[in-house]
Amino acid sequence: MNAIFNFLKKYALIIVIAFSIGAFAGYKALESLDVQALTNATPVPEGLITDKDAFFEILPEGKVLTQKKLTSVDKKAKNIILLIGDGMSISQISSYRLLKGGPNARLSFDKFPISGIVLTHSEDAIVTDSASSATAYSTGKKTNNGVLGLDKDKKFLENLTEKIYKYGFVSSLISTSDITHATPAAFAAHVDSRSKTDDISKQMMESNVMVILGGGRHLFLPEKVGGKRKDGIDLLQEVRSSHTLLTTIDDLDDFDFIDNTKVIGLFADEHLRDIEKPDNHSLEPSLSDMLAFAIKRSLQFNEDGCKGFFIMAEGSQVDWAGHANNINYLKKEMQDFDEAVQNALDYAKESQDTLVVVTADHETGGLLIEPASLTNYTAPEVKFSFNTGIGYGSHTGVPVPVYAYGPGSENFTGTLDNTDVYHAMIEALDLGSQSGSCFQ
Ligand SMILES: [Zn+2]
């Protein structure tokens, strides 16, 4: 007995270490078996990421939102170009910068003298959708997710294009998705659900917006002729009689600028650059092409007596790339948006009378830039990962950046609520007296 005790005493440390290693190895083997068994039994549900540290917290009672005190703008803007990268926060911009030319590359965004941070929550959710966020930008009021141009009680909210029309301004809306999508729709329509595309397209057509460019021909055609309208109305026919309808980039290039009609350009059945419709791509304009057209058209209206113009141009599919968790898609869409932003900035620098505001409605995908290896930060590869869902991501509640250049840009600094962006745009404009439409 003593001999055994002495043996144990002498080799205690070795025994403990050996036991620990054995136990750890056994635990790891069991763990991998368990995980394997679990994975086989219940596959990881789509839309969930299970291997991250998550905390579910009840937030403190919400305070009432107070409007940010703005600096009164002395040198007013004649025109505003608002560019919205749907689903684009700092991580989307940073990823594009890295993919385009490494960490020292500079994008259009980096050339703005003024930048700030925008909080994006909606009336009823910390994580907004595009409809409520775009309504905040178009009306200066919070609303519920999914709602366009109405408040949480479904009361009508006058939007920016309607307001400035009464002061003699002209507006254009541009999108690379269906033109009835939430962001452009918030500047021309008033519906309690963004899915009511029959109503949205009709309201957009009947609105005071003089130039509407994007995709979505099917939203103007009834189902019986291959469209998506449930109400059976051939709105495309109505557009042909009330507007100039453009359907290809050649129509855009060949447009007779003497013509004084409203313009609707529908360059694809659904969204632009649809991967399922490659034959149509060569007929479609880029965001920059559409922006150049809208600027040229608006300047013509200014010459003919309008006080100024407002253009909203959306890089719609940055958001879809985030939902799809697809970095190559994101790169392509960011490139298109970056080009349009650069063109807007170039125009504003040349004209010196135009405020350019670049922002986003929310972040999409929980995009992270990580080292490729946790033990080797200097490895040549960089890991881009989407962190809101496997296969199909969601929006997140992180703030988005805002960049501004030109008269009135001084208010787009510090932290703004998304509703403040509207008020800062209105403060920037030289509205003058309510002179009525410049088209009568
Ligand atoms: Zn969005």
Image (cartoon, rainbow, N blue to C red):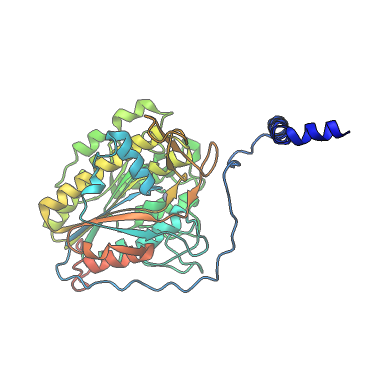
Q: Where is residue 370 in the image (x, y as percent from the top left)?
A: 43, 39
Measured along the vertical axis of the image, is residue 25 above or below residue 241? Answer: above
Q: Which residue is found at the position 24% from the left and 36% from the top?
A: 251
Q: Can residue 54 be seen in this view?
A: yes
Q: In which quarter of the image is residue 14?
A: top right
Q: In which quarter of the image is the C terminus?
A: bottom left
* Residue 122 on image: x %, y %: 47, 61
Residue at coordinates 50% horizontally, 62% vertically from top-left?
144
Q: In this view, does 91 lie to the left or right of 30?
A: left
Hey, which quadrant is residue 427 in on the image?
bottom left
Residue 35 located left or right of residue 384: right
Q: Nearer the viewer, residue 196 or 81?
A: 81
Up the image or down, 51 lies above or below 67; here it is above
- Residue 89 percent location from the top left of the image: 38, 49
Count of marks, rendered view: 0
Q: Which of 88 and 367 is in front in this view?
A: 367
Identified at 39% across, 40% down, the residue is 217
